Image (tube, coloured by chain):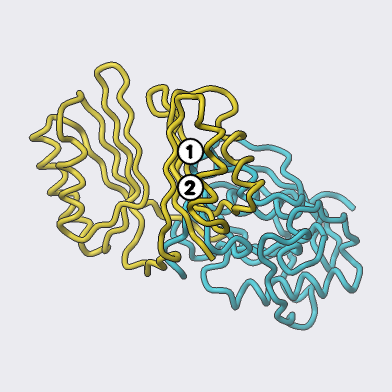
Amino acid sequence: MNELAITVIGPDRPGIVADVTEALARLGANLTDSTMTRLRGHFAMTLICVGPSGAEAEAALAPVVADGPLVATVRQVGTEATSTPFGEPYLMAVHGADRLGIVAALTRVLAEVGGNVTDLTTRLTGPLYVLLAEVELRPDAAEDVAGRLAEVAAGLDVEVTLRRADSDLL
Amino acid sequence: MAEVSGLGDWTLAALGDPGKLRPVVTAPAGVLSRAGDTVDPLDDDVVRLAADLVATMRVSPGCVGLAAPQVGVGARVFALDVTGHPKTVTSHGTFVLCNAEVVEASRWRPGREGCMSVPDLTGDVKRASRVVVRGVLPGTGTAVRLVTDGFEARALQHEIDHCAGRLFLDRVAGAHAVYQRKVYL
């Protein structure tokens, strides 16, 4: 079974999701995980689907992107990597005045202790920069990481909080 | 029968013999998305179901509540026990309620919750942290009014939702508010 990673990005308008997913559904491509969001007026889709070959998916998407400003990429990927959870979920929240390198500096702190970012969003609105990241961390590392993040954030003049994103089984 | 505030003198003894374990149903399963039937709390099958829910809840690690649809029965019955949970404020101990409904809800708070019937995901859901719930106790038929807060209030709303055919997925806070569950209990 082919597994494809597909991205589509272009100026936002109503109907992009319907157009792209309809073309893939007609081809028998089954969407598995996907994330789709609007980024500063561009609509960005990243999705994994299984079924057709890469060439078939490209051909199916060709009419959707042919006469418009949408750009699609299709790439064959290996079968799903099952990542073993090694840590616990934390949420890192950062906000402050925009400047170069905020994401790079703070995610480097996480990477240095083996922290794994599983979801991340940034938003720039006026002068305010906001970064939210879901991170898997070893619980014994969390305290040190929080301290190190605070140091780096102070150097960037932004605020950072790191807290457990714990969930309750009901 | 007059409505009683709290559980009164009801205990698990009202359910007779200890219940048997039933297999837990996971989504997608039709029974989880259908509103359960209103039940007769004195019916033998309902009392047996109540005992089985308690037994199954107790052997499931980390589980603080279990509703009939989660064992494949479309009925408005659930078991609950938040005793000892670190987030518990008020607790009514172990009990089972039939035909329960939330009659007052206030102090809404976000929280991340998971469910035995959706084992691989968690989601951010806003729930009232203070509720008044009405229901009927199995085995005795006593109508009760429970006032509670905090974690027990959240758990009650989750179970009453199950009885109405709703999962936490029906209430998540947004398109980015569902997460792969990373830590298995």
In the displayed structure image, the side of residue A130 where residue B78 appears, left or right: right
Q: Are labels 2 and 1 assigned to the same chain?
A: yes
- The residue tagged with tag 1: helix, strand or loop? strand
Which percent across, then down, holds residue B172?
A: 57, 43
Disc 2 is attached to a residue of which chain? Answer: A
- The residue tagged with tag 2: helix, strand or loop? strand
The reply to whether residue B35 is in sight is yes
Residue drawn at the location 66% of the way across and 51% of the way down = B167
Up-down: is B88 above or below B84? above
Tell me whether circle 2 and circle 1 mark residues in contact (CB < 8 Å): yes
The reply to whether residue B130 is in sight is no
Badge 2 amino acid: Leu
In the displayed structure image, the side of residue B142 where residue A4 appears, left or right: left
Judging depth in this view, the residue of B76 and A27 nearest the camera is A27
Judging depth in this view, the residue of A27 and B159 nearest the camera is A27
Up-down: is A121 above or below A55? above
Up-down: is A30 above or below B42? above
Quickly name the residue at label 1: A36
Quarter of the image for residue B97 reads: bottom right
Badge 1 amino acid: Met
Disc 1 is attached to a residue of which chain? Answer: A
State which mark lies toward you, 2 or 1: 2
Label at residue B176: none
Answer few, some or many: residues within 10 Å of disc 2's Cα (few below 14, many 20 plus, some between 14 and 19): some
Q: Earlier in the sequence, mark 2 or mark 1?
A: 1
Which percent across, then down, holds residue B132?
A: 68, 43
Judging depth in this view, the residue of A168 and B179 nearest the camera is B179
Quickly name the residue at label 2: A47
Residue drawn at the location 44% of the way across and 23% of the way down = A11
Judging depth in this view, the residue of B124 and A51 nearest the camera is A51
Chain A visual colour: yellow
Chain B visual colour: cyan
